[in-house]
Amino acid sequence: MSHSNHQRSAAPHVALLPGSGMGHLTPFLRFAVSLTSRNIRVTIITPHSTVSLAESQTLSHFFSSFPSITQKQLRLLPVNEASVTLEDPFYAQYEAIRRSSHLLPPLLSSLSPPLSALVTDMSLASTVIPVTQALGLPNYILFTSSAKMLTLFVSFHSMVDSQATNDSDEIQIPGMRPIPKSWVPPSLLSDTYNLLKTQIVENGKKMIESDGILINTFQSIEHESLEALNDGKVVNGLPRVTAIGPFHPCDFERSRPLAWLDDQPEGSVVYVSFGSRTAMSREQIRELGDGLVRSGCRFLWLVKEKKVDWEDAAELGEVVGEEFIESVKGKGLVVKDWLNQEEIMAHQAVGGFLSHCGWNSLSEAMWHGVPVLAWPQHGDQKMNAYVVERIGLGMWAKDWDWGEGEMVVEGDEIGKRVGELMGNELHKVQAMRIREEARKAVGDGGSSMKGLIELIETWEK
Ligand code: UDP
Ligand code: UDP
């Protein structure tokens, strides 16, 4: 590192342990870059091997872009039970990391200089906290979703047997006004235990023993939830929750610019994507294509048919129809590949985002001031869509079912809503306001920057 520090012989050294999937890896990498730029030494522990191609490619690109950041691989023990292997592969991977947590002590102890802290993904909290406790190493949890989802996450264990299973249509999460039960991830409401439910119950309960919870959000959009969490209104004795977001997108993520976008008028294109790990049925894909045409808007559409990228082998023409691709030429671009979303969102041609509401996608929309049409598909996404609606970042098609549900949303309906999104001037103004707030939060003197500096000061002690 070029700038020397006269007061200290060595900068604090922090290790990061991400979970699985791009939605968890990306914020960890962005956080790592921001720590490095503040003269913190960073080691990232990467589970071997990763679930998706996107993760392994991103990691190799990342470590060659940031040679000062160290990579340590954690070789995962195989998990063979059907109850795990038949589940969502990303949740199964959390489970594999969780069951390999006892392999961490020699790895953590061997790092030099000695660690000041470990920052752990929330999905690994309950198995990693005991490990760091035994080593006397401070453990911070990085929560990669919204503060509203964190509120549910840390309190769910206390209501799993009562609130979650009673007959009411509403659920009373402590520190929050009652919300429809249908916004809670469906697997949490299931009568039987599944991986997600078990993990959330165990991690949520154990997080009270962490040294702090870091979250990729910021005061001006979620101050209510952040205050409730820090005032003990959600869980008594919860460690301090520090908002340090939204994380800056990093230069290493830049790829090839999309020439097609350069030719489109400013703000004219709706970008359509459901993130890195959401499968959509072919029937729904066809209706969505129909809807985009009906909207009359220009569109850039990332199609995904399988959860895991390397399994997504069908040709684009087979999935959306060859005639479709021909018929939309000039007006719409359909891609079945990994594109750099951050770069798309930054492009002046993009004026709206039909999103599944993965929290990183929303953070990127906020960072670039792009209004959102929320169509949550699974997991935390309705809790995040709730934020979209409350802060006026866009609109939420509440009557559309979860992606995993039986319902197929018709093209006609999709076209109407997309048209409404692209024509709504209020959302554009509000999205630009949020963009400003986002940049203020992480700028000098901003609330998230203050949070980060305080955190680093504790590590320096
Ligand atoms: N992403 C991307 N290109 C793609 C799909 C996803 O760059 O083709 C990025 C997106 O910008 C975001 C992350 O992958 O940073 C996905 O995280 P998110 O929380 O939005 O959703 P998830 O994929 O976890 O459902
Ligand atoms: N707010 C928040 N978290 C949310 C939604 C809103 O902290 O999820 C903030 C919002 O930025 C505003 C305040 O709470 O400053 C009031 O929000 P809103 O206008 O939705 O108020 P309501 O009248 O619904 O309470």
Image: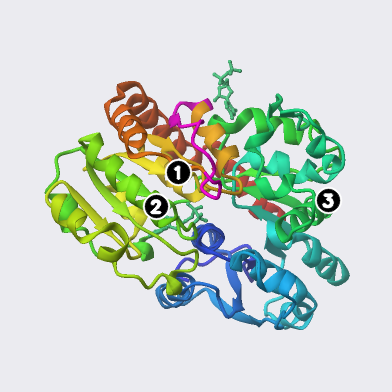
Q: Earlier in the sequence, mark 3 or mark 1?
A: 3
Residue assigned mark 2: 283
Task: Give the CA distance from mark 2 to mark 1.
Answer: 7 Å
Answer with the quarter of the image where residue 49 lies.
bottom right
Q: Nearer the viewer, residue 458 or 357?
A: 357
The residue stretch that appears in magenta: 390-406
Element under disc 3: helix
Picture coordinates of residue 295 (x, y %)?
Answer: 25, 35
Secondary structure mostly seen in magenta is loop
Q: Is residue 461 visible?
A: no
195 lies above or below 411: below
Picture coordinates of residue 278 (x, y %)?
Answer: 49, 57
Picture coordinates of residue 457 (x, y %)?
Answer: 67, 52
What type is the residue that disc 2 sits on?
Glu
**Label ID, residue 408:** 1
Q: Earlier in the sequence, mark 2 or mark 1?
A: 2
Q: Dot 1, how many residues are within 10 Å of its Cα: few (below 14), some (14-19), or many (20+)?
A: some
